[in-house]
Image (cartoon, rainbow, N blue to C red):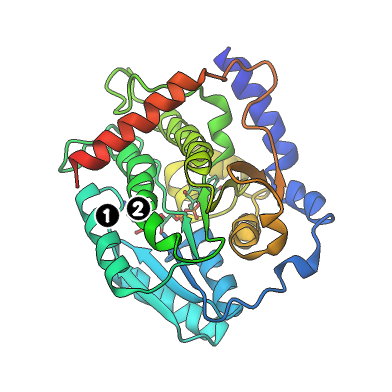
Amino acid sequence: MSLFRNTVWFLKGLKEYTRGGYQAASKNFKEQDLDVDCTGRHYMITGANSGIGKCIATEIAKRGGNIHMVCRNSTTAEEAKKEIVEISGNENVFVHILDMSQPKSVHQFANDFENSNESLHALINNAGCMVNQRELTEDNLEKNFATNTLGTYILTRSLLPLLKKSEKARVVIVTSGGMLVQKLNTDDLQFEKMNPFDGTMAYAQNKRQQVVMTERLAVQHPEIHFSCMHPGWADTPAVRSSMPDFYNKMKDKLRTPEEGADTAVWLAISPSAELHKSGLFFQDRTPVSTHLPLAWTKVCSDVEEKLMKSLEELAVQFS
Ligand SMILES: NC(=O)c1ccc[n+]([C@@H]2O[C@H](COP(=O)([O-])OP(=O)(O)OC[C@H]3O[C@@H](n4cnc5c(N)ncnc54)[C@H](OP(=O)(O)O)[C@@H]3O)[C@@H](O)[C@H]2O)c1
């Protein structure tokens, strides 16, 4: 079954996730959808120093938004900030240093941000990693889970009160179409039973968790517009370093980071995105299925609730 899923997914990817897929899909984009004045509005983008996150930050900065870059490395963050300011001519770009894999720091950061900022109009959870060995953080959490799932959950949950102060605030999660090969598994969040450890599958499971999180948060918080998206296969540092074989085979077919960022920008700022109901999964500005046909990846709602309960328990444990 897993071979079937992987094959179907890869063939789908060759058609849809590549640069060719973007070029075909973008013929249906409406240019005016991104004619948006973001002046006076605040946008937080995690992992905004690199790849897709930097492109999202740049596009929103060009439209006048106040940009809050949340990054773990101050040197690369400041370099990226300089570039974003130069390209956009917008000086309202701010760097915040945070390691998303450290849950206590995520809580602390969100509290500090809430106390020193009056508003937040959109949170774009873009930071992500694929660590190919099973590594534990100082809190004894598996690194991919701590960064991709728990960090995203704690940051989002903690910023909800601030987001709710803005009318129609948005939360966007940059997930991955790779999640289509995974069925939600709530019994092994730390991948203790995954033997041998497989970073690609751990990452895909985290990305499935992000999709479920988006759907569930949308129901719990109807005042906010939640969405998640797949950027397609884009040429970024993460793909080069975490998936070297894939990168070498696919490098001529990959999207640019700008093309990968397009749907996240659209979801964060466009009035057209808001016309879709909250909680959906998007690819190239279109809501798409969260399951491959005949892949048996659907689970009952109890399993999804169990994920949310486990995340909430961990969020409280590390607060
Ligand atoms: N590129 C693709 O084809 C593709 C496909 C599907 C999904 N995605 C998703 O797109 C998002 C952006 O990735 P990318 O491809 O643009 O790669 P990237 O250029 O390497 O960007 C990843 C970003 O996440 C940051 N990050 C990783 N771990 C972090 C942590 N613990 N704390 C704070 N920041 C952390 C990185 O910071 P450093 O620079 O300090 O490492 C970097 O800024 C990810 O969520 C990824 O899963 C990408």
Mark 1 within 8 Å of ligand 1, using the beta carbon: no
Question: Residue at coordinates 84% horizontally, 54% vertically from top-left?
Answer: 28
Describe residue 200's horizontal placement relative to residue 9 as left or right: left
Q: How much space separates mark 1 and mark 2, taking CA atoms? A: 6 Å
Q: Residues within 10 Å of mark 1 (few under 14, many from 20)?
A: many
Which of the 4 quarters of the picture holds residue 205? top left
Which x, y percent locates residue 61?
54, 77
The numbered dot on residue 178 is none
User: Please, what secondary structure does the residue beneath circle 1 have?
Assistant: helix
Up-down: is 220 above or below 65?
Answer: above
- The dot on residue 106 is 1
Q: Earlier in the sequence, mark 1 or mark 2?
A: 1
Callout 2 crowding tier (Cα within 10 Å): few <14, some 14–19, many ≥20: many
Instruction: Kindly tell me whether mark 2's CB lies below 8 Å from ligand 1.
Output: no
State the residue position of label 2: 155
Q: Can residue 81 be seen at all in this image of the molecule?
A: yes
Of the residues shown, which amino acid type is indicated by label 2? Leu
Does residue 198 appear in this view? no
Q: Report x, y in % for residue 96.
A: 31, 69
Q: Amino acid at mark 1?
A: Val
Residue 225 pos. (x, y %):
57, 52
Query: What secondary structure is found at the residue carrying circle 2?
Result: helix
The quadrant where residue 209 appears? top left
Is 123 displayed left or right of 191 in the figure? right
Label 1 with label 2: CB-CB less than 8 Å:
yes
Closest to the observer: 58 or 43?
43
Tell whether 165 sits left or right of 232: left
Specify whether 147 is left or right of 64.
left
At 73% from the left and 41% from the top, the residue drawn is 16
